Image: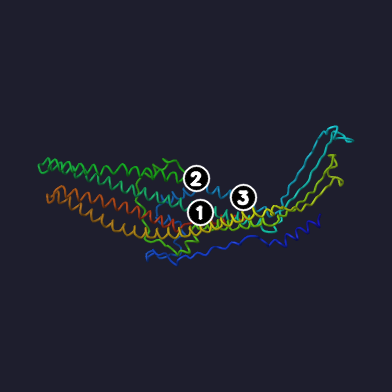
Amino acid sequence: MAKSLILSLSIALLLAGCATGPDYHRPDVAAPGHFLRAGADLAPLPDATDDAFWQRFDDPTLSALVTDALGANHDLRAAVARYDAANALLRENGFDRFPTVTATGAAVQQRLSTDKAVGFPRSQRSYQAGIQASWELDLFGRVRRSIEASRADTAATAHDVAALQVAIVAETARTYMQLRGAQARLRIALDNVARQQETLDLVRASLDAGRGTPFDTSRAEAQRDTAQATIPMLERDIALAEHRLAVLTGRAPEALVAKLDKPAPLPAVPESIAAGTPADLLRRRPDVAAAEERLHAATANIGVATADLFPKLSLGAMFGGQTSKGGSLVSAASMASAVVLGIDWSFLDVGRVRARIDASRADARGMLETYQGTVLHALEETENALVDFQHSREQDDSLARAARGREEAARIARDRYRAGAIDLLELLDAERDLLSAQDAYAQSHTRSASSAVALYQALAGGWPQAGALSLAESSSP
């Protein structure tokens, strides 16, 4: 038995370096040297994407919400659980490299028929116990390729967690911007309603003094009511944002209403955001990393399928005792042993095996296309985010100046109306223009803040994906 075992081990060691199927190599990607839309104000900074990006908005409430979302979001917890399951299965697959050892024991009491027990007692007892070992001799790398594929799939799952972290942080930040933007618009609407009420009171006073007309009063009332009509929808937008933020942080929808109902200014938008280079982006994006790991797994699975073209050898051994007397189970006479070298001849079914190989190669080609498409999507998303951020900042600045100008014009119009220099229609036009300009600026400022969040998301800035990558790197059995 020992000689057979040594011979089998020698063969296995000699062929241990062989592995069927192609070795994985990272695909070459022709990434441009720089982003087309990254202007001088977006010059790359070496550490811009190393920090938690939401902290650059300098808003403690936003930072607290992001922390809660990363710790309590149920979708994220489910993704982490999927990673834990994949990592556990990877550890299980790693044990395929080693012998499987089991222990067995049995005590049998049987009564034979008279016809069968000729010359023997009809009642018989037997006992057996032993240790069994089995080991697939991985001569052609089937086990190694299988573990390689499992390791890549596990790493892809870790990158999926990272991508979901980035998405959840971005959605939390974006929803928070929408909440504060809606509160700013509500404040503008309420101020405008109060201003329109003052105008209406002024018109009524003029009518009582004999200087106005009922038509002027009706127009002033209509403009006040029009301003009032915008308030319910803004209150709805605020409520929806509060509910969404609560669910993102793992709470019931109404849990944050009392905390977030108190208005706060919209966070300041960073003057510039480092874009880095496309090559840096592709190394940082977790969705690109996940697509590459799935391509790696598909490549390794070609080797798993190709190994079926060769015989599958397994080594088995048993050592134990067999007896009909319980007390003598461990005696020298009861000892039994066996060594078995098994061969799986299913490799002769070449047609089915080659069909599986062709399917594996086609799957790898598909994963390559998916990877290349993910790369292009990442570059497109980042270029689009750069364009949106640049132009939203420009629009934001223009509308801020317009709002200040309309505010000054409305103040002058009110003074001139009191002095009788202009009629009511000119005053109402000036106040309507003021409301429009202020509301447009509030919406633009919200879009500008949201575009900054979208750019950070496209750049995959922040630590969440780095944390998940460390999980992937430590998952090897």
Q: Earlier in the sequence, mark 2 or mark 1?
A: 2
Query: Mark on residue 89?
Result: 3
Above or below for 151 versus 320 = below
Alpha-carbon span between mark 1 and mark 3 = 20 Å
x, y (%) of residue 322?
A: 83, 43
Above or below for 122 versus 173 = above
Alpha-carbon span between mark 3 and mark 2 = 23 Å
- Quarter holding the C terminus? bottom right
Estimate how packed mark 3 is, as few (under 14), some (14 to 19) or many (20 or more) residues with alpha carbons within 10 Å. Answer: some
Whether residue 94 is visible, yes or no, is: yes
Q: Badge 1 is on which residue? A: 162
Whether residue 474 is visible, yes or no, is: no
x, y (%) of residue 457?
A: 44, 56
Query: Mark on residue 284?
Result: none
Horizontal placement of 130 versus 414: left or right?
Answer: right
Query: Mark on residue 74?
Result: 2
Alpha-carbon span between mark 2 and mark 1 = 15 Å
